[in-house]
Amino acid sequence: MSMLKSDWPDLQEIRNGNEAPIITIYENYREEFIVWAGRKYQLDQEDAVDVFQESVICFYRNVVRGKVETISSSVKTYLFAIGKNIIRDKLKKNDPLKVTQEIGEIDVSHQPEIMELIYNEERAELVKQLMQELQEPCNSLLRLFYYFNLSMKEIAQKMQYKNENVAKTQKMRCLNALKEKIKKRFNKDDLL
């Protein structure tokens, strides 16, 4: 019996040869994966595309071979976990990040490191949702700092603060507001 989150496609359809769900997954996550791999692992676009394609193929093979039946993550988290595993393997071997002829199967359901990544990604997604609930200027300020990696000086200019010290003070207030939201919604020991 399959127990998957609602954003997962019908796995039996994929096993029966319907490629439409795989194409949808590819189209939905390609750009986000490329940005993520570039930012997190400093991959250039070509290498990130190659790794993403390998990840989708591994995802497909895991589905077809019945390795994916029960999982508590989203499709995105599962796919990015596969990508992270591929990147780490390639970096360990110190090979160029090019697609190889034979792509190995990656079973993420039994690897504690991958399950930890899935757990961390889910927590990050929940924090991201709570951050969106913050009022302005907090939402914008935290996005500029954490997502776009702008310096406090750049943030001060962009948000028209007097100087970077004002931006730093506002950032601390915003972080405190976010922490309060997190504490109210979750057990702080589980999330922080």
Image (spheres, rainbow, N blue to C red):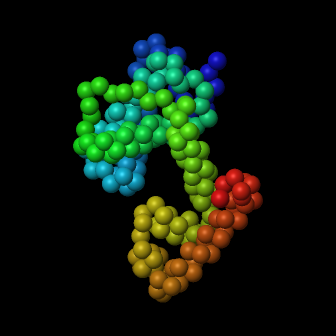
Q: Classify residue 116 by image quadrant.
A: top right
Would residue 163 appear left or right of 184 to someone viewing this image?
Answer: left
Q: Is residue 138 left or right of residue 179?
A: left
**Residue 106 position (above or below residue 140):** above
Please, which residue is most extreme toward the bottom here?
A: 162
Is 183 situated above or below 82? Answer: below
Task: Identify the image quadrant of the C terminus.
Answer: bottom right
Given residues 62 and 26, the one toward you in this image is: 62
Residue 182, percent across and down? Answer: 69, 59
Whether residue 35 can be seen here: no
The reply to whether residue 78 is in sight is yes
Q: Residue at x 56, y 39 (%)?
A: 112
Residue 164 at what x, y percent from top left? 47, 83
**176 or 159: nearer the eye?**
176
Query: Residue 75 at what x, y percent from top left?
Result: 51, 35
Q: Residue at x 40, y 50 (%)?
A: 36
At a point 52% along the width and 40% down the height, the residue shown is: 114
